[in-house]
Image: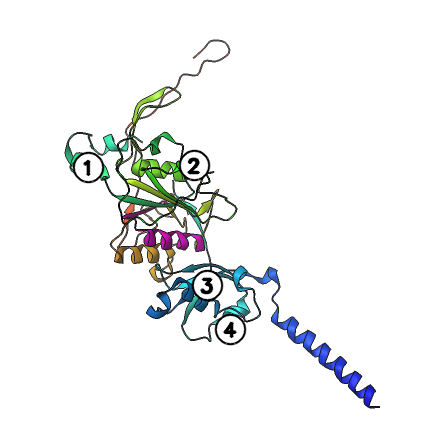
Amino acid sequence: MDLKFISTFLCFVLLHSSKTLGDHFTNQSDLETYIIHLEFHDQVLSSSKDLHLWHQSFLPTNSNHSSRILYSYRHVFNGFAAMLSSDEVREMEKKPGFVSARPQRIFQMHTTHSPSFLGLHQNVGLWNASNSGKGVIIGLLDTGIDPQHPSFNDNGMPNPPLKWKGKCEFNVITYCNKKLIGARNFADGATSPSDEAGHGTHTSSTAAGNFVDGANFFGNANGMAVGIAPRAHVAMYKVCYGYNCEEYRMIAGFDAAIGDGVDVISVSIGFEHYRPPLYDDTIAIGAYRAMKKGIFVSCSAGNSGPGSGTVANGAPWILTVGASTTDRKISAVAVLGNGAE
């Protein structure tokens, strides 16, 4: 009788335990990327290890912390990005130090003879007076960079400033030089900071491309290609893979650029048809924290409306740059099979 009772009791305990354990495990399909904001604590922030451990303390006790936390943020705000379910977020909200949490959003990329168009000349005026940006470090958050592009040759470039703390994450160490002094990869699916989309190479060369003689498009528009600050250093933070720019990677790019010691952050990425309030705008928040550190932030105004004067990235502490027009066109002659032009 006793043995029967004990056997029944053990079966009940095992069944109950299995149910209890099952309740604590979350289906992977229920997980999505959340951006978690926490209160600032100076003592916690003094050590990267302590910061990460404190962030882990907000996760479910049964979870694999190393795989759940995608990135811990230090400079933009105190917080982290993690794979969580909505139920887990509701439990997290009860913990001291919690501020807010929401699913991440996806950003879009915003898309020439500009120096001449702006009246900049190599030997006189503002360009010459500013030493063409000599000694300035421009950090770009974008799709990566082609390190072998001629615009990133280091002819005439000085050594990077001593304050520079950045990294070069290319497999070929010589890809970085006195012009391209840093390149970091935060993009999922990418193995290096190289540019698959071309957008980051374009924006980097526009901002700080070195002098390149004989640039042309199949023989058209032949001349010198040069960026606005040709003597400035470039640091690329790859936050997009192809045309996919995840929000938590954008924050990681801002966080790294601030910590590395850039002087300028350039962002040609944003929302197309959505204008979040400033307190919930990742680019505005990242730019604000950079501005507080003395870093100048320039962002694109966007490529779409809904109105003719609608702009993205319009926070008052950002220099928001919109395109106007071009002052030339490239013509071509098409010759048909019958010889007609």
Identify residue for label 4. Answer: 91
Q: Residue at x 37, y 55 (%)?
A: 255
Q: Main secondary structure of the magenta part?
A: helix
Q: Nearer the viewer, mark 3 or mark 4?
A: 4
Q: Amino acid at mark 3?
A: Arg
Outermost residue, bottom side: 1
| Local crowd size for mark 1, using a 10 Å CA cut-off: few (<14), some (14–19), many (≥20) | some
Q: Earlier in the sequence, mark 4 or mark 1?
A: 4
* Among the 4 quarters of the image, the one containing residue 144: top left
Q: Secondary structure at mark 1?
A: helix
Tell me: residue 71, above or below residue 197. below
Q: Position of residue 297 (x, y in %)?
A: 29, 50
Q: Secondary structure at mark 3?
A: strand
Q: Secondary structure at mark 2?
A: loop
On residue 131, which mark appears? 1
Q: Earlier in the sequence, mark 3 or mark 1?
A: 3
Q: Amino acid at mark 1?
A: Asn
Is residue 288 visible to the viewer in this orientation of the structure? yes
Is residue 316 visible to the viewer in this orientation of the structure? no
Marks 3/1: CA–CA distance: 45 Å
On residue 102, which mark appears? 3
